[in-house]
Structures are given as structure tokens and as C-alpha cells.
Image (cartoon, rainbow, N blue to C red):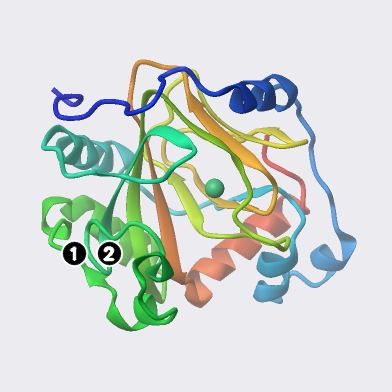
């Protein structure tokens, strides 16, 4: 059974800050920020990706066998391969299929390693051979130029990640991919509302905005976070998706 060997180490109940954050922001529904400068010159990939003030961007037209990838991730959860990830959360676990190692789920600096260590010493980890469909998706469908950290991220039932920002400046951060997204689990962004995740959704997230996650379902929520050099193929997919909506949010 998937939960064997794991337990939520803190209170299952989300802390007050997280509950208040959800009460205030979960039901908001804004459509866009429409920045004409960015829309007028969307060919400049990096301008849009690095400066966009939208809270998220759905990246379209990338095929994903999310059911096959979910089966691989669930098997890795069943066999207790995950590592607890971070404080200010409960039931949040991670596993690198590409990176410094399968259990180095944070940035290099957190382990006393040089800043560029991830760029120079990342590789497919020993876990990769247990998830061939996931590796195939990375290599042949998502098609980053190169990868640094590629992680399964699991939020156990009842688990939560408290409100936080990951970036000082506006712009999109790492790519977040929903392998599943059980009803009752939400990623909520301050002043924007709930992200429209569904299985197979590939999203760029502006992690400058405060955001929090709470899994109020009875199913583990499994996403992937992808870091590395996006390259022109994936960047073009982002820009095409942005242009198609004229900068409007997918909600
Ligand atoms: Fe975050």
C-alpha cells in the first residue's frame, strides 16, 4: 500500500496561515493581466518568460502519457523511494529522476555545493530506470535542451505547503506538470485564485506570487517540477500558447 512506511510528520491539519490564505484566495477568478508590450513582441521568448506578470501559463500541444507516468510514480511511492522535502509543509515528498542524485531534491547551495554544481553534475539518477515512460516523455515530448533537476513531487492526502514566494522578481519559474490532480487538491495563488490543473496539464508558474497547496482529497497528488535549459523547442511552445490566448489566462 502506498502509505506504508510514510506518515505525515506534523499535524495533518493545515496551519492557520494556510487555511486563512485559502479562505481568502481560493475562489478568486481573474482572467488576465494583458501586457500589450509582451503581446506585441511575443517572438522574444525570454522577454515573455522572464518578465510576464501573469500568474501562470498553460503550455499546449505537448503529448503526455499521464496515466503511464502516474503508474510509475505510484509504484515508486509504494516502494518508499521518496524523501521528505521541506519545512513549512506536511506530507510533501520528492524524488529526483534527473539531478545530482535521487535524494538531493533541493538546490546545490542547500548541500554546501557550488552554485553551478547542478549545471555541471546533473544526470539521470538510478531512479530513471524505474520510470521509462517518464524519461521518454522528458526526452521526446517535453524536449528541454538540457535538464538539471527533474522531480516527482508528491503531496500525501491531508498534506499542505504553506504560502510562500520562490522568486524576488516577476516572471515564470520552473515548469510544473500535473501527473494527477485529485478533486479537493488545489494550488492557490494570492490575489489570483486556483490554478486550473488537470492530469497532463503543463504549466509555467510565476512563483513570485505567494502560493500554497493543500490536498484535501484521499489520494496522493503527484506533480513534476522540471528545471534546466528550456531551449527553443519548449520556449516556442510557451510563446505559441501565450499568443493563442492573447495573453489571457487559462482559468
Ligand atoms: Fe513554490
- SS class, disc 1: loop
The residue drawn where x is 50% and y is 56% is 175
Q: Is residue 43 above or below residue 161?
A: below
Q: Nearer the viewer, residue 81 or 176?
A: 81
How many numbered marks appear?
Answer: 2
Does mark 1 have its CB less than 8 Å from ligand 1? no
The residue drawn where x is 74% and y is 66% is 51
Residue position for label 1: 125
The residue drawn where x is 73% and y is 60% is 170
Residues under numbered marks 1 and 2 in contact, where contact means CB atoms less than 8 Å apart: yes
Residue position for label 2: 98
Q: Residues within 10 Å of mark 1 (few under 14, many from 20)?
A: some
Q: Is residue 60 above or below residue 124?
A: above
Image quadrant in which the C terminus is located: top right
Q: Residues within 10 Å of mark 2 (few under 14, many from 20)?
A: many
Q: Nearer the viewer, residue 169 or 53?
A: 169
Q: Is residue 26 above or below residue 229?
A: above
Q: CA distance from mark 1 to mark 2?
A: 5 Å
Amino acid at each position: 500500500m502506498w502509505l506504508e512506511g510514510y506518515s505525515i510528520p506534523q499535524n495533518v491539519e493545515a496551519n492557520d496561515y494556510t487555511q486563512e490564505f485559502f479562505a481568502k484566495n481560493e475562489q478568486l477568478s481573474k482572467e488576465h493581466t494583458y501586457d500589450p508590450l509582451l503581446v506585441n513582441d511575443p517572438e522574444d521568448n525570454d522577454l515573455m518568460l522572464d518578465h510576464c506578470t501573469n500568474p501562470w501559463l498553460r503550455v499546449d500541444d505537448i503529448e503526455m502519457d499521464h496515466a503511464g507516468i502516474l503508474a510509475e510514480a505510484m509504484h515508486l511511492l509504494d516502494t518508499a523511494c521518496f524523501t521528505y522535502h521541506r519545512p513549512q509543509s506536511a506530507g510533501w515528498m520528492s524524488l529526483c529522476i534527473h539531478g545530482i542524485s535521487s535524494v538531493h531534491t533541493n538546490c546545490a547551495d542547500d548541500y554546501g555545493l557550488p552554485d553551478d554544481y547542478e549545471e555541471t553534475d546533473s544526470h539521470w539518477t538510478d531512479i530513471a530506470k524505474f520510470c521509462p515512460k517518464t524519461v521518454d516523455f522528458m526526452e521526446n515530448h517535453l524536449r528541454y535542451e538540457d535538464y538539471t533537476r527533474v522531480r516527482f513531487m508528491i503531496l500525501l492526502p491531508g498534506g499542505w505547503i504553506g504560502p510562500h514566494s520562490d522568486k524576488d522578481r516577476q516572471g515564470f519559474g520552473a515548469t510544473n506538470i500535473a501527473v494527477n490532480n485529485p478533486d479537493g487538491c488545489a494550488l492557490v495563488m494570492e490575489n489570483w485564485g486556483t490554478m486550473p490543473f488537470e492530469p497532463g496539464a503543463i504549466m509555467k508558474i510565476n512563483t513570485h506570487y505567494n502560493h500554497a497547496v493543500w490536498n484535501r482529497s484521499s489520494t496522493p497528488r503527484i506533480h513534476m517540477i522540471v528545471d534546466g535549459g528550456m531551449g527553443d523547442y519548449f520556449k516556442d511552445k510557451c510563446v505559441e500558447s501565450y499568443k493563442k490566448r492573447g495573453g489571457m489566462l487559462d482559468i
